[in-house]
C-alpha cells in the first residue's frame, strides 16, 4: 500500500517518428541550437490533457476509462501540422510550436473523450474543460531569454499524419537532456468504416 512514487502523466496524440524527425530537423535549421532546447523526436506529441502527478494505484482504472471513452470516437483522423506559433505569444516566447489541424471538430472530440475518460476515473477536469484548446506540438523552448529568430516564423513545418489512437504518456525527468515521454498505453479509436 502506498509508498510508490507518483507518475507524471498526460494524454496526447503521438506524432509518428519519421515525421517527428523531419520536423525537428527543419526546426533545428531555423533556430540556433545555442539558444534553444529541443524535444526528443521519440515522444513528440500533441498534448490533450495534462494530468500531472498520479498515484500508481489509479493508473489501471484510468486506462480502463480511457479505453471506454476513446473507443467511441471514429477514426482514423487525418491530421496535419501547419504553421508556427508561440506561447504565451510572439515576442515573449516560452514555447515554440507547430500548429495541428484536422477536419472541423475532430481534435476537439479527441480532447473531450480524453477528459471524459479521466473524469470517469475520478479526476477533476472542470478547469481543463473551460480552457481554450490550441492544438500544437512543442518543437523548441528558449534557454533563458532567447528570442525566436525571424527564420523560425517563416519555417515550413507542414506534414500530414494519421491519428489511430490516443496515448497515455509518462513524463520522465532525465539527468541529461529533456524529459523523456514514455508511451504507457495506446487507446485505439473505433474504425470509422465498421458500421457502414
Ligand atoms: P519541464 O516542465 O521539466 O521543462 P516538459 O514541459 O517537457 O518538461 P512536462 O512538464 O512533464 O514536461 O509536460 C509533459 C507534457 O504536458 C508537455 O507537452 C507539456 O507541454 C504538457 N504540460 C505540462 N504541464 C502542463 C499544464 N499545466 N497544462 C497543460 N499542459 C501541460
Ligand atoms: Mg513542463
Image (tube, rainbow, N blue to C red):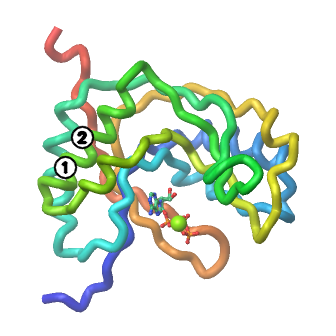
Q: Is residue 151 above or below residue 78?
A: below
Using residue 64 as the reference point, say whether residue 142 is left or right of it. right
Query: What residue is drawn where x is 53% and y is 33%?
Result: 100
> Residue 151, how many percent across, how many down?
86, 40
Q: Nearer the viewer, residue 69 or 154?
A: 154
Q: Where is 115 relative to 146, above or below? A: above
Q: Quadrant of residue 191?
A: top left
x, y percent for residue 52: 36, 68
Residue 117's disc number: 1
The quarter holding residue 189 reads top left
Q: Which percent across, then down, holds residue 8?
A: 38, 70
Residue at 12% x, 53% y is 120
Residue at mark 1 to residue at mark 2: CA–CA distance: 6 Å
* Quadrant (top left/top right/bottom left/bottom right) for the N terminus: bottom left
Q: Are marks 1 and 2 in contact (CB under 8 Å)?
A: yes
Q: Quadrant of the C terminus?
A: top left
Residue under the image location 69 percent in, 37 percent down: 84
The answer to whether 26 is drawn above or below residue 196 in the figure is below
Percent position (x, y) of residue 94? 67, 59
Residue behind mark 2: 113
Residue 180 versus residue 63 in the image, above or below: below
Q: Residue at x 24, y 91 (%)?
A: 3
Amino acid at each position: 500500500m502506498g509508498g510508490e512514487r507518483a507518475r507524471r502523466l498526460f494524454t496526447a496524440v503521438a506524432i509518428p517518428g519519421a515525421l517527428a524527425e523531419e520536423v525537428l530537423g527543419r526546426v533545428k535549421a531555423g533556430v540556433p541550437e545555442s539558444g534553444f532546447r529541443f524535444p526528443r523526436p521519440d515522444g513528440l506529441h500533441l498534448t490533450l490533457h495534462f494530468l500531472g502527478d498520479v498515484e500508481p494505484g489509479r493508473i489501471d482504472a484510468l486506462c480502463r476509462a480511457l479505453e471506454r471513452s476513446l473507443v467511441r470516437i471514429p477514426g482514423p483522423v487525418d491530421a496535419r501540422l501547419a504553421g508556427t506559433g508561440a506561447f504565451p505569444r510572439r515576442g515573449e516566447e516560452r514555447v515554440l510550436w507547430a500548429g495541428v489541424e484536422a477536419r472541423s471538430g475532430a481534435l476537439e472530440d479527441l480532447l473531450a473523450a480524453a477528459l471524459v475518460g479521466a473524469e470517469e476515473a475520478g479526476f477533476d477536469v472542470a478547469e481543463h474543460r473551460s480552457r481554450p484548446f490550441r492544438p500544437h506540438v512543442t518543437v523548441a523552448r528558449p534557454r533563458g531569454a532567447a528570442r525566436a529568430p525571424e527564420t523560425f516564423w517563416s519555417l515550413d513545418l507542414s506534414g500530414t499524419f494519421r491519428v489511430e489512437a490516443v496515448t497515455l504518456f509518462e513524463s520522465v525527468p532525465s539527468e541529461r537532456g529533456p524529459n523523456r515521454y514514455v508511451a504507457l498505453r495506446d487507446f485505439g479509436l473505433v474504425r470509422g468504416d465498421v458500421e457502414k
